[in-house]
Amino acid sequence: MTEIHRPKKLLGYLAAFSIVFIWSGWIVATRSGATSPLTIYDSTFLRFGISGLLVLPVAIYFKAWRGLTLKQILVTSQSLGIVYILVVFLAFKHAPAAHGGVFMNGVIPALTLFFGWIWFRDIPHKMQYLGATLIIVGAGMTLLGAENTATPDAWLGDILFVIAGLFFTFYMILTRLWSLTNMQIVFCSSVVNGILVVPVWYFFAPSGLDQATIADIALQGTYQGLIATLVGMLLVAFAVRHIGAPTVAAFMSAVPGVAALLGLFLLGEEFGLLGWLSLLVLTPGILITAIWNRPSKA
């Protein structure tokens, strides 16, 4: 039996390794889109329009809406939906890719810890307090170092990244609270948002598609509508199933650092000495919070 499961466990590790680069690449791709002629509404349309179109026939075949109330469909779709992604795209208009890795992805474990305690009465492990403290200190160091390495209003982008992290934390709470399946999540996030966003974008939203290059459109369409939204999510589900959520979360601790490196080499965005030092504090904090993630009940 062990020999049978070993290949799947190895594939689980490969999936988790791939997720790190997919997620980090999404941060850089989104920042690239934010600095292109594309508006935040164009990127939102490309994300949900393409993913919704791809998922629609599968969702109809499996009747993915079964077991969901209208309230659950609407709330789940918007937890990582239109408002969330508009906040993310607007944040990248103001702050560099590395800040997205720190303030959006990096603080999620600390936020999850806090809301898990509030919502489910999960008492954090004492080591998780240390991890959360390191995360907060690391994020603070990034903020202090931002003035020499980013635009003057990078602080606004950082605040928006934290708001996006709150959305993501709320989404994770919902998946646990309502025991949502992967098909239900894909249906809500892609199909429902696609139905909502396409007509609004077409009739009312300002667009820069006619000024953008084919490369800009192709990058955002492929990454937003396919790789991040569908491939990434399926890899996360596969990895969690075969190596467990704590191990996947531990892998994800590398995202801020990888995103900073990709931002430097692909976009030429300097992170600064204090920024790099902040990763040395932040990354162990994420790792500690992920490893000691078996809280007790109050």
Image: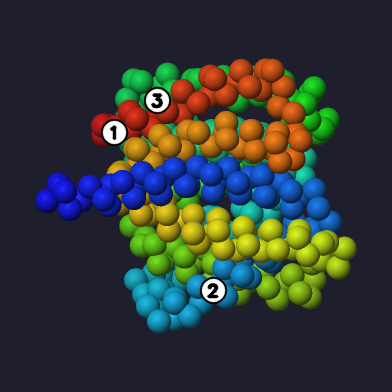
- The residue at 80%/58% (across/down) is 38
Q: Is residue 248 visible?
A: yes
* Along the viewing direction, whichever of 207 and 65 lies nearer the viewer: 207
Q: Report the side of 6 relative to 110 (left or right).
A: left
* Of the image marks 2 and 1, the number of the one nearer the N terminus: 2
Give the image quarter of residue 213. Answer: bottom right
Give the image quarter of residue 185. Answer: bottom left
Secondary element at image label 2: helix
Contact (CB < 8 A) between labels 2 and 1? no
- Mark linked to residue 288: 3
Measured as percent of width and height from the top left, residue 184 is found at 41, 66
Q: Nearer the viewer, mark 3 or mark 2?
A: 2
* Along the viewing direction, whichever of 5 and 100 lies nearer the viewer: 5
The residue sitting at the left extreme is 1
- The residue at 41%/49% (across/down) is 15
- Residue at mark 1: 294
* Of the image marks 3 and 2, the number of the one nearer the N terminus: 2
Residue type, numbered disc 1: Arg
- Residue at mark 2: 54
Q: CA distance from mark 1 to mark 3?
A: 12 Å
Measured as percent of width and height from the top left, residue 181 is found at 36, 62
Q: Nearer the viewer, mark 2 or mark 1?
A: 2
Secondary element at image label 3: helix
Measured as percent of width and height from the top left, residue 43 is found at 71, 60
Q: Nearer the viewer, mark 1 or mark 3?
A: 3
Q: Is residue 190 above or below residue 282?
A: below
- The residue at 54%/20% (across/down) is 280
Q: Residues within 10 Å of mark 3 (few under 14, many from 20)?
A: many
